[in-house]
Image (cartoon, rainbow, N blue to C red):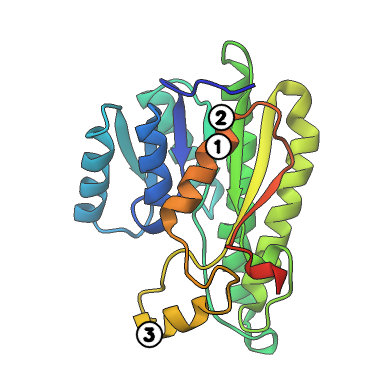
C-alpha cells in the first residue's frame, strides 16, 4: 500500500549539498518537513539549501554536528525534538569518501571512515526508534545510502568499501529487528549519479560509457528512489541499485 508522506518529518544527514540536498528537496516536494544535518558546509550553502526547501511550502531547520561522535548524534536529535517533536523518516546519507588502497590506509583513517559511514547510521537508527514508536500509527522509514562497496570489493577505496558493506548489513539487520514495529529499513546503492568536483566532465562521460545505458544518472534519480522507498509500506530489507545497470558488467 502506498503511504501518504505529506506532513511527515524527515532527518536527512549530510544534506546541505550534493546528493543529500537532492534527497531533502525531493522529500520537501512530497510535502515532508526537513531537518537538514550538516557538519563542514559553509553557512551560506546551508542557508541556500534551507531557502530552497522552504520554497516547497514545508518547514526546514538546520543543525550542525559531528555525527561520527555519540555527542554529535545527541545534538542532532535534541534539535529534532525541539524543532519538530516527531520523526517519520531517517535518511543516513552523510559519508566519508576517501581514496586509499588497503595497505595505505592508516588506523586513524580506518576509524574515521567507519565512524561516519557505519557508527553514525547505527547511532542515528537507535535514536530514531523511540521517536518512531510515538507516531500514530507507530512506525517509520529508514533509508541508508550505500554504494558499490556494499556489493563488490573496491581496490581504490578499500576502507570506504568495507564501511559501506557494513552499512548494507546494518540495513538488513535493522530491517529484521525493527520490522515488527512497523519501522522499515532499506538501502540504496547509487552508481554514477554525481560527478566528483575534482573530476573533469570528459572523464565523467568516459566512465559513463561503461554503463549499459551509456550515460550517467543524477542525484535526483537517487532522491526519487528515497521517496519511493518511504512511500511503499511493503518494502523492508530491500537493496535498490540506482546505477543504470552498471553492476551487470
The answer to which of 9 and 61 lies nearer the viewer is 9
Q: Which label was assigned to residue 202?
A: 3
Mark 1: few/some/many CA within 10 Å (<14, 14-19, 20+): some
Q: Earlier in the sequence, mark 3 or mark 1?
A: 3
Q: Earlier in the sequence, mark 3 or mark 2?
A: 3
Residue at the image position 42 percent from the left and 36 percent from the top: 27
Residue at the image position 48 percent from the left and 44 percent from the top: 224
The answer to which of 205 and 24 lies nearer the viewer is 205
User: In the displayed structure, does residue 80 sit left or right of residue 242?
Assistant: left
The CA distance from mark 3 to mark 2 is 37 Å
Q: Is residue 72 above or below residue 150?
A: above
Q: Quadrant of the N terminus?
A: top right
Residue 65 visible, this orientation: no
| Residue picked out by circle 2 | 231
The CA distance from mark 2 to mark 1 is 5 Å
Residue at the image position 37 percent from the left and 26 percent from the top: 31
Tell me the element at label 2: helix
Q: Is residue 159 above or below residue 191?
A: below
- Quarter of the view holding residue 132: top right
- CB atoms of marks 3 and 2 within 8 Å: no
- CB atoms of marks 2 and 1 within 8 Å: yes
The CA distance from mark 3 to mark 1 is 32 Å
Q: Is residue 222 above or below residue 237?
A: below
In this view, the residue farthest toward the front is 213
Mark 3: few/some/many CA within 10 Å (<14, 14-19, 20+): few
Q: Quadrant of the C terminus?
A: bottom right
| Residue picked out by circle 1 | 228
Residue at the image position 62 percent from the left and 29 percent from the top: 232
User: In the displayed structure, does residue 48 sit left or right of residue 211?
Assistant: left
User: In the displayed structure, does residue 60 sit left or right of residue 75?
Assistant: left
- CB atoms of marks 3 and 1 within 8 Å: no
Residue 32 visible, this orientation: yes
Amino acid at each position: 500500500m502506498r503511504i501518504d508522506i505529506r506532513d511527515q518529518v524527515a532527518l536527512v544527514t549530510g544534506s546541505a549539498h550534493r546528493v543529500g540536498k537532492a534527497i531533502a528537496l525531493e522529500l520537501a516536494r512530497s510535502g515532508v518537513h526537513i531537518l537538514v544535518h550538516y557538519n563542514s558546509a559553509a553557512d551560506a550553502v546551508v542557508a541556500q539549501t534551507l531557502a530552497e526547501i522552504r520554497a516547497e511550502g514545508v518547514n526546514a531547520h538546520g543543525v550542525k554536528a559531528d555525527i561520527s561522535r555519540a555527542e554529535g548524534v545527541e545534538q542532532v536529535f535534541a534539535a529534532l525534538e525541539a524543532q519538530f517533536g516527531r520523526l517519520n523518516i531517517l535518511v543516513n546519507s552523510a559519508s566519508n569518501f576517501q581514496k586509499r588502497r588497503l595497505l595505505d590506509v592508516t588506523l586513524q583513517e580506518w576509524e574515521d571512515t567507519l565512524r561516519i559511514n557505519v557508527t553514525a547510521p547505527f547511532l542515528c537508527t537507535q535514536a530514531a526508534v523511540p521517536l518512531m514508536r510515538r507516531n500514530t500509527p507507530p512506525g517509520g522509514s529508514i533509508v541508508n545510502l550505500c554504494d558499490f562497496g556494499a556489493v563488490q570489493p573496491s581496490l581504490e577505496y578499500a576502507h570506504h568499501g568495507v564501511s559501506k558493506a557494513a552499512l548494507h548489513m546494518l540495513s538488513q539487520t535493522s530491517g529484521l529487528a525493527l520490522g515488527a514495529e512497523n519501522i522499515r529499513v532499506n538501502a540504496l546503492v547509487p552508481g554514477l549519479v554525481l560527478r566528483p568536483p575534482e573530476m573533469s566532465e570528459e572523464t565523467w562521460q568516459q566512465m559513463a560509457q561503461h554503463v549499459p545505458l551509456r550515460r550517467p544518472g543524477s542525484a535526483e534519480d537517487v532522491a526519487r528512489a528515497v521517496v519511493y522507498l518511504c512511500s511503499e509500506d511493503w518494502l523492508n530489507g530491500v537493496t535498490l541499485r540506482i546505477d543504470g545497470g552498471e553492476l551487470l558488467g
